[in-house]
Amino acid sequence: MTKNVALVTGGVGGIGTAISKALARDGYRLVANYLVPGSEARWLQEMREAGHAQCTAWAGDVADFDAMGRMVQEIERELGPIAVLVNCAGITRDAQLHKMSKADWDLVINVNLNSVFNVTRHVIGGMIARNCGRIVNIASINAQKGQFGQTNYAAAKSGMYGFTKSLAQEVVKHGITVNAISPGYVGTDLVMGIRADVREKILSQIPMGRFARPEEIAHLVSYLASEQAAFVTGANYAINGGQHMC
Ligand code: CAA
């Protein structure tokens, strides 16, 4: 039986695709939001090959509040109520602060943090009215420990923790859960794009001796979206191969 809609922002990216597949497998009518025109074609093909032909890709800039309002309205009108929201869209513009441009600061804050407000704000009213919902925010190990070259990214991702815990308190009485996941370094294009010598150094700091597989993050999202996770809210799950323990 097809459940309600699950919306994954940045759903066609490295981690996003694995999350999309996991939620589609769980029976949700999966919608992956994406930004770059054309990036959805390969994703749609991959989803079809994985047996998830019902999935939909939806264009829209998560940094644009009004565009997200229109997107949520259209999805709910055409496919039904959004039961699960995964805020996964994210980018990096790494540079030491003394070299960082204002544009790269603003872009990372807008895409990685303001986006969480821009999408969730439009979804939360429906969830409250229906007295159910699951929200999962994809943060980062670097929000927990900080990272040389990532003042913008770490600030945005750790902002997600305050958002998660505050919203969790506001909506708990409506049976809605809000949680965060903090992945370590996952073997996606984002991480493989780090300069080779820097990447090797990072790898040497991971006790597990490898980068995470996107599916390992997706399994945790699947659990947090499930009925079995009804008592879990306001939590943050580290999943980093032992690189950072707190
Ligand atoms: N700690 C302390 N010092 C460091 C350092 C570190 N981690 N990394 C570099 N340095 C020092 C270098 O030793 C060097 O010192 P000297 O000038 O004295 O020799 C100096 O800083 C300059 O180093 P770089 O050549 O690396 O500086 P750069 O300006 O060319 O590049 C950078 C800076 C772009 C930030 C580069 O270091 C980098 O790409 N770092 C990786 C950042 C990172 O981990 N990003 C994560 C991306 S993936 C992601 O974000 C997903 C997720 O959630 C995990």
Image: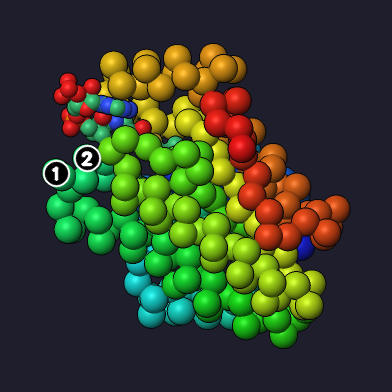
Q: Is residue 149 visible?
A: yes
Amino acid type of disc 1? Lys
Task: Name the one closer to the observer, 126 or 138.
Answer: 138
Residue at (60% x, 47% y) in the render: 181
Task: Name the one closer to the observer, 219 or 5.
Answer: 219
113 relative to 39, above or below: below
80 relative to 154, above or below: below
**Mark 2 vs ligand 1: CB below 8 Å:** yes
Label 2: how many Cα within 10 Å (few below 14, some 14–19, many 20+): some
Label 1: how many Cα within 10 Å (few below 14, some 14–19, many 20+): few
**If the image is split into quadrants, where does the C terminus sit?**
top right
- The residue wearing badge 2 is 96
144 relative to 191, above or below: below
x, y (%) of residue 21? 62, 44
Residue at (21% x, 45% y) in the render: 97
x, y (%) of residue 214? 56, 34
Q: Secondary structure at mark 1?
A: helix
Does residue 114 appear left or right of residue 241 in this picture? left
Amino acid type of disc 2? Gln
Q: What number of labels is visible?
A: 2
- The residue wearing badge 1 is 99
Residue at (61% x, 70% y) in the render: 166
Q: Secondary structure at mark 2?
A: loop
Which quarter of the picture shows residue 125?
bottom right
Classify the position of ligand 1 by quadrant: top left, top right, bottom left or bottom right: top left
Do residues under tags 1 and 2 come within 8 Å of each other at their CB atoms?
A: yes
Residue at (27% x, 24% y) in the render: 195
